[in-house]
Image (cartoon, helix red, strand yellow):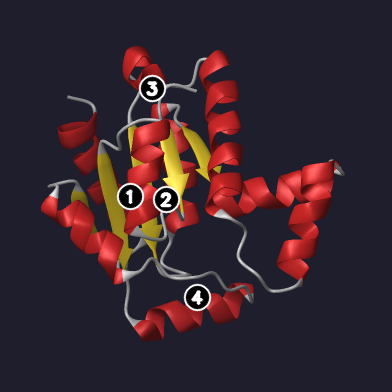
């Protein structure tokens, strides 16, 4: 895939990041419903590949069962394949959930797939995150500080307070997308 494929289609890419339990998934569902974007989660893509029974999926399963990180090039390939498929189906934009986890991943994504229009970082107190995680009994890794600084310097980062109601947070997200992404 060429880096300008997304640019040529004029569809926005939004990185959605934040700690586990901050509300990324909930907000992504609502954004998809309103804007017609495609929601891609790197974790979901990995799980789907494992479930597919492919040779690559079998190798991924071994890697994950060993507690090792999946190589960056494999994750990026899965994202590229999903982006290509979604573009062919007429996607109006992309929400890339839980990715990038570091600056190198973000730079490689933008070089190989397309530039992110913005990065939405959901913030919530540790107390709120723990309460939410206890409710759903799942864990995910947090978005590190370095990518946050990187995208802030590029003027792409928007911090959203994840402490409010789902509706209040959604209004903030939509206001940002309407004023910064869809212009």
User: Tag 3: Cα neighbours inside 10 Å, few (<14), some, or many (≥20)?
Assistant: many
Residue that label 4 marks: 132
Q: Is residue 169 left or right of residue 155?
A: right
Return the disc, 1 or 2, that comes first in the chain's sequence. 2
Q: Which of marks 1 and 4 precedes in the sequence?
A: 4
For the residues labelled 1 and 3, the Cα–Cα distance comes to 25 Å
| Disc 1 to disc 2: CB gap under 8 Å | yes
- In this rendered view, identify the residue nearer to me: 60 or 136: 60
Residue under label 1 = 170
Task: Give 124 or 72, whichever is nearer the viewer.
Answer: 72
Residue 53, given in percent of the width and then of the height, sits at 87, 44
Residue 163 appears in the rendering? no
Q: Upstream in the sequence, badge 4 or badge 3?
A: 3
Tell me which label, 2 or 4, sits earlier in the chain: 2
Secondary element under disc 3, as helix, strand or loop, is helix
Q: CA distance from mark 4 to mark 3?
A: 34 Å
- Give residue 112's position: percent from left, percent from top: 41, 33
Task: Give the distance between the C-alpha atoms of the residues marked 4 and 1, in whole angstroms.
Answer: 17 Å
């Amino acid at each position: 895939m060429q880096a300008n494929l997304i640019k040529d289609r004029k569809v926005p890419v939004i990185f959605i990041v934040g700690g586990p339990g901050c509300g990324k998934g909930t907000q992504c569902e609502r954004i998809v419903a309103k804007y017609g974007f495609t929601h891609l989660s790197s974790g979901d893509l990995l799980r789907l590949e494992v479930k597919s029974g492919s040779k690559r999926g079998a190798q991924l399963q071994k890697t994950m069962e060993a507690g090792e990180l999946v190589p960056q090039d494999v994750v990026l390939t899965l994202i590229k394949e999903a982006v290509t498929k979604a573009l062919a189906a007429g996607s109006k934009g992309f929400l890339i959930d839980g990715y990038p986890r570091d600056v190198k991943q973000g730079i490689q994504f933008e070089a190989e797939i397309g530039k992110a229009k913005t990065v939405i970082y959901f913030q919530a107190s540790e107390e709120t995150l723990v309460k939410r995680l206890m409710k759903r009994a799942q864990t995910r890794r947090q978005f590190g500080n370095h990518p946050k600084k990187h995208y802030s310097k590029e003027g792409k980062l928007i911090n959203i307070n994840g402490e409010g109601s789902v509706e209040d947070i959604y209004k903030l997200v939509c206001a940002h997308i309407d004023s910064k992404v869809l212009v």
